[in-house]
Image: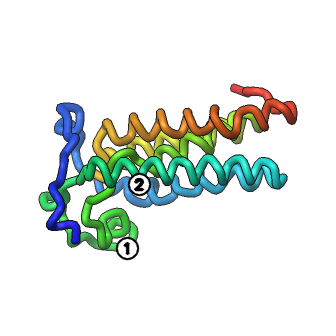
Amino acid sequence: LHTAQRAISLASAVDARIPYLPMLAPLFVFSYTLCLMPILFFPEIHFFRRGALALVVMLTICFACYAALPVRIFLADLPRETNGFWLRLPVFESSGWNSFPSLHIAAATLALMSLVRVKRFVTYYALALWVLAFVGSLFLKRHYFYDNVVGLILGAAAHFAFVESTLRRYGYKWRF
């Protein structure tokens, strides 16, 4: 199905300078836990509803972008055979489609912007996971730099559009 579509590449000079580092795979995979952390710290139903709404809107935008602009990461030059499950996981069964914008970075940004309202330790931990997600997706060649930047903007916009007012209403303040 995808082979018949015309692929678009958003590779930039920044992407050309970033080496492929498969040893980051375990950390990158671990960074996915950031997207679930708000559930631990905001278990109330109104927070869940606003976060879920933000995620659905982000998914819709990402799928619309994919339909209109089918960006593809070209993985042909990457080694497909590596030793160990954790090193294979980020490229396992991946065709490189649906790269723009990065939904992973959008969801991680949405989570991070909510978690900066919890204790400082949680804020710093969430920020570290966000950096692992952003950097890991670049060094593992999962996304182009611009995919991540637009994902960051999308996540921040979804946070301010759907979640921020609820957090403010219940007295959560930014903590750094």
Residue at left offset 22%, top offset 44%: 19
The N terminus, quarter of image: bottom left
Could you tell whether 88 is left or right of 127 in the image? Answer: left
Judging depth in this view, the residue of 53 and 143 nearest the camera is 53
Between marks 1 and 2 in the image, the one whose residue lies nearer the viewer:
2
* Callout 2 secondary element: helix
Judging depth in this view, the residue of 103 and 56 nearest the camera is 56
Residue 155: image x %, image y %?
A: 53, 39
Q: Give the number of callouts.
A: 2
Could you tell whether 42 is left or right of 89 in the image? Answer: right
- Type of amino acid at the residue the image marks with label 2: Phe
Q: Residues within 10 Å of mark 1 (few under 14, many from 20)?
A: few
Residue on which disc 2 sits: 63
Residue 63: quadrant of the picture: bottom left
Residue at left offset 21%, top offset 69%: 80
Q: Which numbered circle lies on residue 75? A: none
- Type of amino acid at the residue the image marks with label 1: Phe
Residue 108: image x %, image y %?
A: 54, 46
Could you tell whether 48 is left or right of 98 in the image? Answer: right
Residue at left offset 24%, top offset 40%: 18
Residue on which disc 1 sits: 85
Residue 8: image x %, image y %?
A: 19, 48
Judging depth in this view, the residue of 21 and 90 nearest the camera is 90
Sequence-wise first label, 1 or 2: 2
